[in-house]
Amino acid sequence: MRSFFHVSDIGPLDKALEEARKVKQTPFAWKGLGENKTIMLVFFNSSLRTRLSSQKAALNLGMNPIVLNIGQESWKLETELGVVMDGDKSEHLREAIPVMGSYCDLIGVRSFAGLTDREFDYAETILSQFVEYSGRPVISLESATVHPCQAFADLITIDEFKTKKRPKVVMTWAPHPRALPQAVPNSFAEWMNEADVDFVITHPEGYELDPRFVGGARVEYDQMKAFEGADFIYAKNWSCPGVKNPDDYGRILSKDMSWVVDERHMAVTDNAFFMHCLPVRRNMIVSDAVIDSPRSLVIPEAANRVVSAQVVMKRMLESL
Ligand code: CP
């Protein structure tokens, strides 16, 4: 495996889930695989789960993880080509990436969408430069448009907790005070469309995700109707993807608090589990009562981030 950005990179999901179960049962069984190997984990943005779970996964495989926080511990990096570098950015990605590549065997990159230039973000301009110039297999640790390590962990969690062969999974938009990227909902949609689930997306008008991620999923604008009979509720905020109106890209179009997932919503489900990738704003995205209930999976979901990262790194090490 040379890159991990999309569900297609992992191959058949039944095989990936089987491998995840083995990794979870015996996390240290491949300790020799990463001996004398290094993974560079490059963060342009903040993280708790991705940073820690990636390090833990690398250590389980016997690898040395190096974490670099760009702009805090390194020089500020210029990402755009052709600019006169007379500002506060001391080094260009064009040099920094091959240098980082020369110090490691695998690279993971977190680089959020800027949410001002849809074309720049949806071309995955920064991640693509890591692919082109590092000479190493590259993992998206949440890039401009995708968060595959999260979506794989979400799938593992649904597989562990489902009680029906084909559960109903509903991804719902929820309000947030700040404009957030679309990477998590894009990847969750992409992965659920490949999984054996009945997948429904619900959001207010104007929040339509990019069609390449929505695929054949059912989109229901009535949130309560979407929740009826659901087995899993996956909540997430995202800013306007600019599909219907490109001028609205990255904007907050609604702060409608009736979309906050609370007990009224959960009452119409089939005793659904609640999921969120975290970090979550309580009583903005989800009520205290729902996230604190026994049906909340947010902690096991976060724990499975080690498993998803370890399967991906293991596959990359096996194909070096
Ligand atoms: N879910 C997730 O990616 O968490 P962090 O932003 O804390 O890494």
Image (tube, helix red, strand yellow):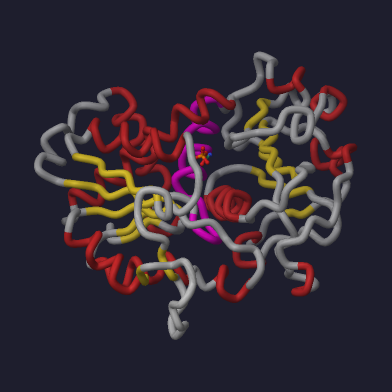
Question: Residue drawn 33% across and 68% down?
Answer: 131
Residue range in magenta is 143-161
Is 290 situated left or right of 148 in this image? right
Image x and y of residue 171, in percent: 69, 43
Is 122 situated left or right of 210 in this image? left
Is 247 situated left or right of 97 in this image? right
Quadrant of the image occupied by residue 116: bottom right
Image x and y of residue 296, in percent: 64, 22
Image x and y of residue 125, in percent: 47, 71
Q: Nearer the viewer, residue 81 or 74?
A: 74
Quadrant of the image occupied by residue 65: top left
Q: Residue furthest top?
A: 294
- Counting labels gives 0
Question: Residue drawn 69% across and 61% down?
Answer: 209
Looking at the magenta stretch, what is its main secondary structure? helix
Q: Residue furthest bottom?
A: 82
Image x and y of residue 78, in percent: 43, 70
Q: Nearer the viewer, residue 236 or 162?
A: 236
Q: Nearer the viewer, residue 264 or 193?
A: 264
Quadrant containing the C terminus is: bottom left
Quadrant of the image occupied by residue 281: top right
Q: As displayed, is residue 2 above or below residue 120?
A: above
Q: As displayed, is residue 119 above or below residue 281?
A: below
Question: Residue drawn 42% across and 49% down?
Answer: 72
Q: Within the magenta stretch, is there residue 152? A: yes
